Amino acid sequence: MTILKDSRRNFLKLIGGLGVGTVTGFNARGRGALSPSTEVKNVVSPRSARARYMGDYAALKLETVRCAFIGVGSRGPGHARQIAEIEGSEVVAISDLYEDLAKKSAGECKEKGRGQRHQNIDLYYGSEDGWKKMLQEVKPDAVFISTPWALHAPMAIEAMKQGAHAFVEVPLALTIEEMWDIIKTSEETQKHCMMMENVNYGREELMYLNMCRQGVIGELIHGEAAYIHELRGQMEDIDRGTGSWRTHHYAKRNGNLYPTHGLGPVAQYMNLARTEDNFTRMVSFSSPAKGRKAYAMKNYDADHKWNKLDFKGGDINTSIIKTTLGRTVMVQWDETSPRPYSRLNLIQGTKGTLAGFPTRIALEGGVEGATDSHHDWVYEDQMQRIYEKYEHPLYKRLGEVARKMGGHGGMDFIMRYRIIECLRKGIPLDQNLYEGCFWSAVGPLSEKSVKEEGAPQAFPDFTRGEWKNTKPLSIVQ
């Protein structure tokens, strides 16, 4: 089914491409400025009588998971294409603002379907509200949302209200208020809402989780997490594409705009928001804003729209999180500076340290067959025994096919596979609703702290105290 409306031209100007992983700096209704995320609201509303805590929630088994996709320009096509190859899935609908993107993604899914699977895919394009009509008419079991950041929360909320489990690209939402709205909807509809943090499924991250669970580095005391990824080239997306909307966020917002890739794995190593410990407060500081303006002046004409922006977001942001147990996590973000990619991925304990970029470990007393003390790192090429002993069972099971399927070294495929597997088996997801909120909350809290010269900001307890009774993520077999 194709939906066309007269509003298409105006919406194109505002959103610049819903499905290209794209954003403009406008809110979900396509008007106004970026969400005022520095206006943090930590009000906790009581859980309604018909609501249910979703921390360890397991939905009813689905023999076949009927999947729909909103936004298939950047991340979306990969979700649709790989899920089409996973047993027990059926791609039933695709929505995108652009006709060419919707049709291309549907064609890829049909090709992957082999036989009768994914041959009847309803398409919705050309309309600001096509995705809503898709939800109402198709009634999918699961909806995968890969759209501009400002659209994540309203789309996830509507998907759950229409009876679907919602799977949302990072970050889950832009404001604390939106996060509470997502929680309220999920608890009342008893539908999953998972932020798709793919980095938690990387080989290194999975193995470090396994090592932490087995006490290899003792009691955990400190973590370091980051998303350092020079992405100035996205500014080439002028009218359609990721840079066409993301650039406006860099200009208007000052804080950590993309915290979850580094933080997600470290938070799960530490069992944050699960039984043992939780987020309490955070301070944040940003550097001067220099790089984006300099890049725009060097690469675009003086009258280009990028040179008319006042870039206020610091090139690098550093935040420090304090937990209930007094542990610390440093979180950094930099998508501007000319430096190599890194997520840091460091977890420090009383008996040693595990770190990434490059992959390396140091253990008190040394690492068998490699070092005699913790004063020297053991790097990946010397870690064969470590991999043999501590490789995560999930990676042992899926690693080979994941590498062949691709997607950030295979982590994307493992995440997608686990989503379908959990829904079909009727078991809790690996990442729950509240984790997505806690990890995403670093964004608006960091902005407020930066605005207030580094003043501490308290994390809302999105679980209302239930984190103390939420099981740690198990080592998935």
Image: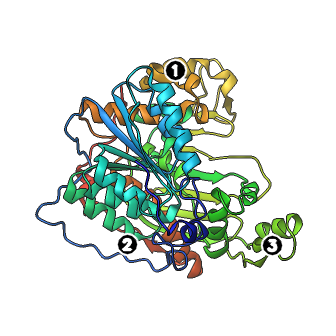
Marker disc for residue 252: none
Looking at the picture, how far across and down is residue 97, in whole percent? 52, 56
Q: Is residue 215 visible?
A: no
Disc 2 to disc 1, C-alpha distance: 40 Å
Marker disc for residue 177: 2
| Side of 24 where 154 appears, left or right | left
User: For the residue marked with disc 3, what is the amino acid?
Assistant: His
Residue plotted at (25% across, 30% down): 425
Residue plotted at (32% across, 37% down): 66
Secondary structure beneath dot 1 equals: helix
Above or below, 245 relative to 305 = above
Q: Earlier in the sequence, mark 3 or mark 1?
A: 3
- Comparing labels 3 and 2, the label whose residue is closer to the camera: 3
Q: Earlier in the sequence, mark 3 or mark 2?
A: 2
User: For the residue marked with disc 1, what is the amino acid?
Assistant: Val
Quadrant for the C terminus, please.
top left
In front: 4, or 244? 4
Residue plotted at (69% across, 23% down): 381
Secondary structure beneath dot 3 equals: loop
User: For the residue marked with disc 2, what is the amino acid?
Assistant: Glu
Looking at the picture, how far across and down is residue 206, in whole percent? 48, 33
In front: 366, or 393? 393
Marks 3 and 2 in Cβ contact (< 8 Å): no
- Comparing labels 3 and 1, the label whose residue is closer to the camera: 3
Secondary structure beneath dot 2 equals: helix
| Side of 93 where 139 appears, left or right | left
Residue located beneath label 3 in the image: 304
Q: Residues within 10 Å of mark 2 (few under 14, many from 20)?
A: some
Q: Give the quarter of the image for residue 187.
A: bottom left
